[in-house]
Amino acid sequence: MNSQGSPAPALAELSDVGQRARRRIAYRLLPFVFLIYVVNYIDRVNVSFANLRMSADLGFSDRVYGLGVGMFYITYVLFEIPGAVIAERWSARKWITRIMISWGIVTALTGFVHTAGQFYAARFLLGAAESSFFPAMIVYLTHWFRLRERGRAIACLYSAVPAASLIGSPIAGWLLGVHWPWLAGWRWLFVLEGFPAIVLGIVTFFYLTDWPAQAHWLPEQERNWLVNELQAELAAKKKVQNYTIMEVFGERRILVLMLAYLLAMTGYLGNVYWIPTFVKRVSGFSNQTVTSLLLIPALLGVGGMLINGWHSDKTNERHWHTGIPLLAASLMFFLATFTRQEMTLTIVFLLLGSGFLFAYLPTFWAIPTTMLSEAAAAASFGLINSIGQLGGFTGNYAIGFLNDRTRSLAASFAFIALTYVAAGVWVVSLRVRDAAGVLASATRK
């Protein structure tokens, strides 16, 4: 209190404590969650680079490859919701550790497949091993970051996706060209990239802390500040509406987000697993050149995610920040369908579309955290992600089918463009309807 009895110094001190706590938490947690998500994503999509040689060596058609890639998502979706709730109610740290070690083992074993059946089985098991990793990571971040910082925190996590391409593309280009004894280069790609996940899984168990109240690496003042802030946010959300897990499944806005995410992921996951093949077939370039070109969308993605997440937090707006990147990516793939005779333009549109899309991801996942709390939010992450990941099956199989049926890539480009534009329209329409509802409510008053 000052001489006039004002509490201003105490408030200033609290603000300083909060600033120190935010910095300490960000420096300790964000680089590590970024790192483990990089490893996760490299292991998930390394099959797209391996396919530059794998299908030819094993005699797989596009439909076989597309179905094999899609098999991952059948088991992946089965455990998303229970896995997210386990991370919330038991231990995100222990659950993430289990996931990382098991997926690392399965990834390494994928390097020894010889038949389509073995390929399907490996992808099937990988989906089961990795299931609920992403919603567990989102759950973990909600334990440590307030709503006003959550967009940037999720952007930091999601920037690992394009960053994984920055790291994984040159590694894949190099390994595809090696001629070591016993195994082809694409097999070494799986074997060697499985081990970092196992090692980091063990590190995760000892490095991460489940809850702020358990964080002995935070000074007591900072620990208490964060616990109080998160509890105050939780109480404020419960005053609006305290959803149960079952109520989440019937909430209109969650269902709209679920549909939008399914559409977006159908195109996105199809593109992720096919973009090296797209560029290779359009250009005829070498494997090393193709993997080098794919650094471009990765760089665009890192910048787009961080800038879009920062601007979304600054303006406190999520829906347009999600919809615009989807619509921009759709336009690029739509244009690519009309430039088949212009190789350079087609490649430019493919790379730009692949890069623009990344920016929607962190702001999309900040939307449900503004509505729900604790277990309900965790269940919504699992529900939305599990349904969305079905797009990994439908998108990849559809592209393989269209390629085989039409003997052209144009139909696949148009398919991806349509999924993106539909997803973008759904997300923006949700924003418009919510705004209209608020206006109508204010008018009645």
Image (spheres, rainbow, N blue to C red):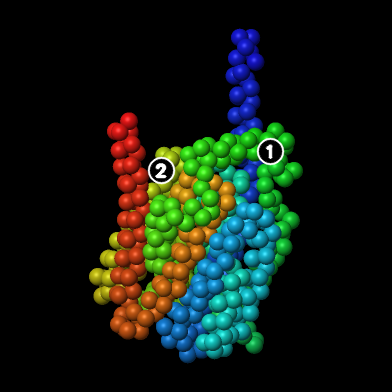
Q: Relative to 106, does residue 57 appear above or below in the rendering?
A: below
Closest to the observer, 173 or 192: 192
Q: Residue at x 61, y 9 (%)?
A: 4
Quarter of the picture containing the N terminus is top right
| Farthest residue, direction top | 4
Q: Which residue is mark 1?
A: 223
Q: Say whether residue 82 is left or right of residue 51.
A: right
Q: Picture coordinates of residue 335 (x, y %)? A: 27, 65
Q: Relative to 277, does residue 424 appear above or below in the rendering?
A: above
Q: Residue at x 41, y 77 (%)?
A: 397
Q: Which mark is residue 317?
A: 2
User: Residue 228 appears in which quarter of the rendering?
Assistant: top right
Closest to the observer, 422 or 189: 422
Amino acid on which the number 1 mark rests in the picture:
Arg
The Cα–Cα distance between marks 1 and 2, rounded to whole angstroms, is 29 Å
Q: Say whether residue 65 is left or right of residue 93.
A: left
Q: Say whether residue 124 is left or right of residue 296.
A: right
Amino acid on which the number 2 mark rests in the picture:
Glu
Q: Residue at x 53, y 40 (%)?
A: 238
